[in-house]
Amino acid sequence: MSLWKWLCFCCGISICLAAGAADEQALVFPSEMWQRATPEKQGLDSARLREALDYLHANAGGVGTDETIIVRNGYLIWEGPDANNVHEIYSCTKTFTSTVLGLLATEGVLHVDDYAAKYLPSLDDQYPAYAQIKLSHLATMTSGYDSLMGDGWKFYETDPQKHHEYVLTFTTPGPPLFPAGTSFKYHDPAVHILGHILTKAAGEPLEEVFKKRVADPIGMKQFRWSNYGNKDGVLFNNPAGTPGKDQGGVYSSPRDLTRYGLLYLNKGNWNGQQILDASFVERAASTQVPAEVKTKYFDLTGRYGFFWWTNGIKADGTRPWPSAPPRTFTAHGAGRNFIFVIPEWRLVIVRLSPAPGGRTSVGGMKEDVWEQFFARLKQAIDQ
């Protein structure tokens, strides 16, 4: 090879390596404080980012973007004025429960595809069909489990004590909805029975498992998990974020929840410490309920992982957020609470809002609001 060709070859390799390095910029991790950077330093156009955020603020309802934070490559590039507010996050809590499932699996306490009755032998005593339920079925809302009293929030606003007692019946089995793995129902009782099983397997509350293995190592200072009191001698945390007086599951702030999102963005690794097995994170945050699954209930088929909502392909062939990358996933809680993780863009976006008047807003944001936001955000990112 001539010297000229050799130099051109080396130059080409250098350019490719540099481009790859730019695409795979190493994540930074916050200590007590987040490291800050301008949007431009992290490859975003400030003016277009502002346009995207202005749209979100005007259309998201609640507090707009006041409790929003955006981190790219681990650098805080934008936050609202109330990004340190702490309140309940409702069904975003469900992903904390599946994270505990992942922690116990990572430690070898259990396997995500174990049968649930292995840890709760009474589960199938009255209904033999429940012997076929796996922990992964419970984590994907495909178990067919139903409680004796169903999943209504019967006394939520009228009688807090009755509501409390009613929700605790979620762990008392009732007739199956369908055979395990054959359909889908977004259903708080299934999350409660999983939370009960995980608590028994761990021998300690979900809050303690998460705090010791995740919250403390990644620096979440604002973290607590509402509970129903003792169950079988162990404190039973609200595993689903089911609303109620002094309930709502996990309580935290956008700043601390962004740390949680960053852990998932980095496949369970926090600054060199593998907290969650990477294969679990991959499975939890990707579609586990095929679009081909038929359901007569609220339909999240094609776009649901281990309690995470994904940007998977639905039965109609479309994605929920076409302008966002395919691997985008989010925790989603009533009252318009979201923890978005976007691996292709190396972004974590947390957007919270207190439920109006202390009540949950079941409808939440229209999904198209996020699609329009992502369409604008996409224009802000250097391609």
Image: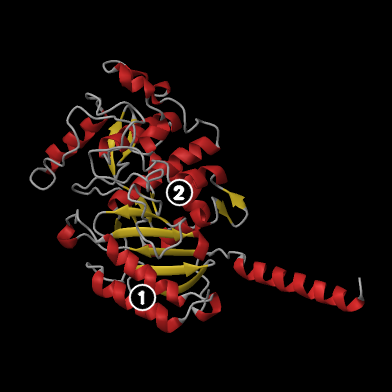
In terms of image quadrants, where is residue 190? top left
User: CA–CA distance between discs 2 and 1?
Assistant: 25 Å
Q: Residues within 10 Å of mark 1 (few under 14, many from 20)?
A: many
Q: Secondary structure at mark 2?
A: loop
Residue at x-position 38% and y-position 68%: 374
Pinpoint residue 227: horizontal percent, then vertical percent: 29, 42
Q: Is residue 381 left or right of residue 189?
A: right
Q: Amino acid at mark 1?
A: Ala
Q: Is residue 164 left or right of residue 223?
A: left
Q: Is residue 166 left or right of residue 212?
A: left
Residue at left 45%, top 38%? 101
* Residue 83 shows in the view: no
Q: Earlier in the sequence, mark 2 or mark 1?
A: 1
Please identify the quadrant where the N terminus is shown: bottom right
Specify how the rendered protein is coloured: secondary structure
Residue 137: percent from left, percent from top: 38, 33
Which residue, given by chain and number where applicable, does mark 1 sit on? 52
- Identify the amino acid type marked 2: Ala
Which residue lies under the disc numbered 2?
285
Which is nearer the eye, 283 or 28? 283
**Residue drawn at (58%, 65%), measured in percent from left and top?**
28
- Say what secondary structure mark 1 lies in: helix
Residue closest to the eye, 349 or 201:
349
In this picture, is 96 found above or below 192? below
Q: Quadrant of residue 202?
A: top left
Residue that extends furthest to the right in the rendered view of this protein: 2
* Closer to us: 64 or 344: 344
